Image (cartoon, rainbow, N blue to C red):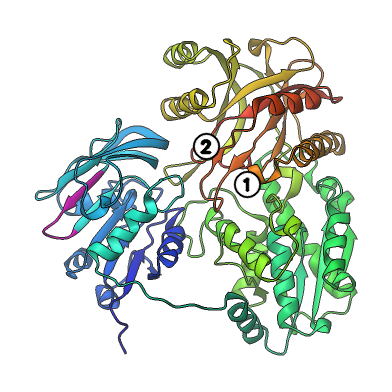
Amino acid sequence: MKLKKNTIAIIDLGGQYCHLIARKLRDIGVEPRIYGPDVAPKQLDWCAGVILSGGPQSVYEAAAPKIRRSVLDLGVPVLGICYGHQLLAQMLGGHVTKRDGEYGHAQLHVKVSDTLFRNTPRSQQVWMSHSDAVTQLPKGAAPIASTERCENAAFADFKRRVFGVQFHPEVVHTEHGRQILKNFARCVCKIRKRSKPSDRIQRLVGWIRQTVGDRSVFFLVSGGVDSTVAFVLCARALPKERILGLYVDTGLMRERETEELRATLAGLGLADRLMVRDASALFFDKLRGITAPEEKRHIIGRLFVQIQSEAMHEYGIDSKHWLLGQGTIYPDTIESGGAAGRAALIKTHHNRCEEIRELIRLGRVIEPLSEFYKDEVRQVGSALELPPQLTQRWPFPGPGLAIRCICSATSGKAAQLSSASAETVREAGFSGVLLPVQSVGVQGDARTYRKVVALRNERRRFDYHRMQELSTVLCNVHAETNRVIVLLATGSEVRLEDARIRQASITRKRVDILRRADFLVRMAMERSGLTGAVWQFPVVLAPICFGGGESVVLRPVNSEDGMTANFARLPLPFLMRVARKVANLSGVDAVFLDITNKPPATIEWE
């Protein structure tokens, strides 16, 4: 039986935001379905429209993902986004070439304001993440929007009902992105809004019962929002004796983390279903001397599986009758390469190491939240009547402070910026250097691992807007970097030119410094009533040295779902007061603020 034509097919070309397109369509009452690039056209004859997602490759590469030409002959509207925009233009006879990168905010100037841009302003903010561009449009297509760096930021062939946008309407930082997708669905595809109320909790509980059957669930609980909400969902679905939680104290947790989790679960009547195991000595031993971010993540993921297996054996749990429960959410999967492996690997999350993937292949893992984003998880937690201090708490990565304690296999000194970048920095009232410490970024839907630019404000004026513009320019034109930080405070007078990087790996001493700095920042935010002003606030320890210590980097960000983010604009007097307190900690030489959006940087440094 064919479905009614009220659904949009999304063809996944490997983009980090593919699933986010589906989520945004659900938000406006449209049912999406995701397919791979090899989907046969006959599988799509039920759909009212097709969307081609972004992707990390270049359309002119031999191995780049393609779709069948006959998909464009289905007679339904097609919208290409980013890579999809370029692929659509190329398939119809246009040209795509390598251009200067464009990452983060851009100002879009609309030339044709009906159809896609109906009910949106002529000038609007969009979110870019690309290094290629459509330089010649196909015959019959016309440009309908542009940016300063991208002449064909959007095009349309109204006769064929084919549209392309270089920017990402699905991310929250495109201020009218929801309306643009709504216009495509309603005005172009002619899909009527469907009212379909559902009880999300009831659906999830039913799915858990059906999936688990007569088995039980052994849950890995980290203390964060995702794993705790997933654990409580399973507890709601199953008899108490058929669920058991394990909290592994890795030694890499935030200060008071274990005590807070015990209190939360006690308040929910689940304290007796939680076991706590101190494995800190094992984690520090296995991480000794490790500096590569991916290697750290893989080691931590393997250790979690090892400890879980040991605990199951110790407690007499038969793996044939128990499933492993995890609080995995969708961004974990997509940043780890995607469920089908089409997306680029940005960073391997601990719940997606190879050992976990094998258990998933064997059908021995249950993940109730794997299709959800962070804000949706918070909504589920609220519906479960979990306390706000849990549902609204800042996200904390499963690998803990290990990926906020930056390591380096080599030592080195700060280098001068290129002449063009140095001139740009000077004109903005800053001085700057290129640091030989690397961090993970996401640019053009692909992973980058690049150096960091450090700035110092020479005019004594703290202008967030100017800093964002400067950060965007540096990451777009400086091929060596994907992250920009600005000096806030020091324990003594320092010069950026004297910065050096020293060899460093994970040690208890370094983690203790980071834990104390993190706790100081969290307490200051709570006392000032600013906790709700940011979505997440990583505190990073990096081996950036000016004396005998290291540097702390403050990374407050705001986001809706973690897929994109802006660095947060905290009140300057508060920010400087906190920075000075952190700079006075033993082992800290300097404190910086990370002023990079996502993209080009990821939220976490590793």
Q: Is there any visible trace of residue 244 in the rendered image? A: yes
State the SS at label 2.
loop
- Stretch of the chain drawn in magenta: 154-161
Q: Position of residue 424 (x, y in %)?
A: 44, 15
Q: Is residue 323 visible?
A: no
Question: Which residue is at 20% across, 54% downward?
Answer: 91
Drawn side of residue 562 relative to residue 102, left or right: right
Which numbered marker is on residue 131? Answer: none
| Horizontal relation, residue 127 to residue 594: left or right | left
For image coordinates 41% across by 46% down, the residue present is 175
What's the amino acid at mark 1?
Answer: Trp
Residue 159 appears in which quarter of the rendering?
Answer: bottom left
Q: Where's residue 40, x and y in %?
A: 28, 73
- In the displayed structure, does residue 570 sit left or right of residue 447? right
Kindly identify which residue carries mark 1.
Answer: 535
Q: Quadrant of residue 452?
A: top right
For disc 2, the marked residue is 597
